[in-house]
Image (cartoon, coloured by chain):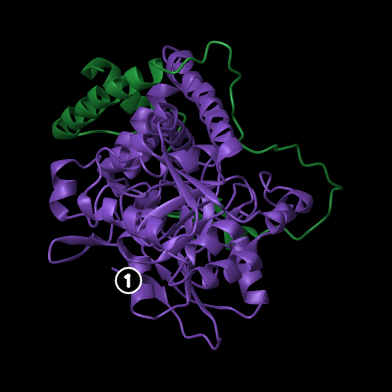
Chain colours: A purple, B green
Amino acid sequence: MIYTAKKDVNSACKIVAEDMLLTTDMPTAAGSKMLDGYMSLLEAEVLTILKDKGYGVCGKADVGEFAIDLLGETSYNGANTADGKLLNSSSEILKANEADAVIALDVNGTTRRAAAQNGLVSVKPTYGTVSRYGTVPVACSGETVSVMAKDAKTCRKVLDDIAGHDDKDGTSLPESEIAKKADAKEIKRIAIINDMMADVSDDVKANIDSAVAKLDVEVVNIDSSVIASSRPAWNILMSAELCNNVSRYDGVKYGHRAEKFSGIDELYTNSRTEAFGDLLKTAIIFGSETLSTENYMKVYDKALRTRRVIVEEFAKIFAEFDAVMIPACSKAFYTEDDVKADKYVSYKENFYTAPASITGLPAVVAGGVQLIGKAFSENALLELASKI
Amino acid sequence: MDRVILRRLELLNQLSLTETQKDEVIAFFADRENDAKVLENIDTSNVERMVHVMPVMTVVREDIPSQPFSRDDLQKGAPETDEGYWCVPRVVE
C-alpha cells in the first residue's frame, strides 16, 4: 500500500504526510496493526503550520511499523515491491508527481535511504528546529521531522516554513537558536570518512565520486572509527526509547484489542502479541534488556557516554572541515531477499544514518550521497546539494 | 541471552513469542554482542552522559485554561466502553 489515506485538496503546493504524523481528518496507524483505523484528536504541529501557509495535505503515505525498518517493508499492510525490489511509499508518491514534498519522521534513517536510492533530496534538520508535537513517538532523543522532495529548492522552502520554536514541544529550541541557520557559512571543505566506505557497493561509490566531481570544494579523505561506532550506540538508545514509548499500547483505551483473553494480563499480552510485528517485538525485548538492572550501566549508560564522544569527534572534524560526506545506504536498492535473509537488516544498514541520528546534526541527501554538517547548517548543505 | 531471561523479558513487556521468534531474538542478541565489542573500544572513562544532544531546558510557562477533549471524543477509538467507562476484564477476584 502506498497511501493509507487520500483526499482532494485545492492548493498550489501539495504535501503528503507520512503515517507517523497525526491527522484529524485521516487515520494514523504508524504502520502498525495496533493503531489500525486510529483517529487522532490532535494534528501534528508541522501540518497545522503548513496548512496555515497555504499548503494542502493530500494524503498519508504508508510506513514500516513505527518507522524503524529499511524502507517501510514491515508495514502491517505489507511491503511495497516491484520486480523483487523494495519500494518506499513516500518516494513513489514523489516520483509519480502526486505531491511536491513529503513530511516524514526520520526515526532510523528510512527517509534518507529512500531519497538516496530514488534520486530524491531529503533534509533531516538540526534536532529541535522543527516541532515534533503530534508525531508518533519512537526514539525521541534523535528522531526529527524531515522533508523529502524532488529538489533541494523545494526542501529548503518547506523547511523554512516549518522551522521554528513550539511551546508544545519540550525539545523545541528557542527562536534565537533556530535563527542561526540563516548564518550558515558556505561549504568549502568536505571530509569523506574512509571507515564508512568499506562495505558499500560500486554504485554507491560511484555516487560519491560523481558528487565530488560536481562540487567546487576541497575534499579530503579521513579516518574515524569513532563515527563508525554510532550504529551500535544508536541501536541501544533507539531501542530503549522505543521500548518505553510503545509500552502505552495495551488494548485498553484505544488501539487493537485481542478477541480472546481470560483476564487483564492476557488482554494486554494477547493484544500486543497479535498487533506487533517481529522486528518491533525484537526491538522492544532488546530495549528492555538494555534498561535492565544488570545491563543499565554496561549497555545503556555506555551508549549515552559514547554519544558524547561521537558529538565531540564531529566537533573536531568540523574544526577543519565544513561538512562530512558519507553514503546513506550500502547499495543502490534493497530486495525482498535482503529482508528474508535477515529480518533485522535495518539494525545493520543504519550504520550510515546513525551518525546524524545520534548527534542531532543536520543531514541532507542528494545524488545518492549524504552530507552532514554543523548544527544549523542545513541551508548551506541544501545549497551544496543543489549542485549535485 | 537464554530462554529463561527471554521469558522474563516477554512477561515484562506483555509479549508472547513463538519458538521460532525466540530463536530469532536469541540470534539477534548474539549479533548485538559483536556491537558491544565495538563500544568497548570507545574510551568513555572520563566522559559525561549525553541524554540530550541540544540544550533542552525545562519549559516554564503560565497556566493557561483551555477546553480539554470531551470524554465522548476520547472514547471514540476505544475497543469497549459502557456508559462513559472503559471496559476491561475483572481485575479484582
Give the labeled residue for mark 1: A92
Q: Is residue A105 left or right of residue A334?
A: right
Amino acid residing under circle 1: Glu
Residue drawn at x 33%, y 54% is: A209
Kind of element beneath mark 1: helix
Residue drawn at x 35%, y 58% is: A368
> Is A135 above or below relative to A1?
above
Q: Position of residue A13 (x, y in %)?
A: 54, 81
Q: Is residue A388 left or right of residue B82?
A: left
Quadrant of res A3:
bottom left
Quadrant including the C terminus of chain A: bottom left
Q: Is residue A302 left or right of residue A62?
A: right
> Is A222 above or below relative to A329?
above
Q: Position of residue A315 (x, y in %)?
A: 59, 34
Quadrant including the N terminus of chain A: bottom left
Q: Position of residue A385 (x, y in %)?
A: 48, 62
Residue closest to the far bottom: A10
Q: Position of residue A277 (x, y in %)?
A: 28, 46
Chain ID at mark 1: A
Quadrant of res A369:
bottom left
> Is B78 above or below relative to A358?
below
> Is B30 above or below relative to B16?
above
Residue in the foreground of this view, choosing between A375 and B82: A375
Residue in the foreground of this view, choosing between A266 and A213: A213
Residue drawn at x 63%, y 55% is: A131
Q: How many other residues sit within 10 Å of disc 1, few (<14), some (14-19) or many (≥20)?
A: some
Residue in the foreground of this view, choosing between A52 and A84: A84
Q: How many numbered circles are shown?
A: 1
Residue drawn at x 59%, y 29% is: B51
Q: Is residue A109 left or right of residue A50?
A: left
- From where the camera sits, is residue A167 visible? yes
- From where the camera sits, is residue B72 visible? no
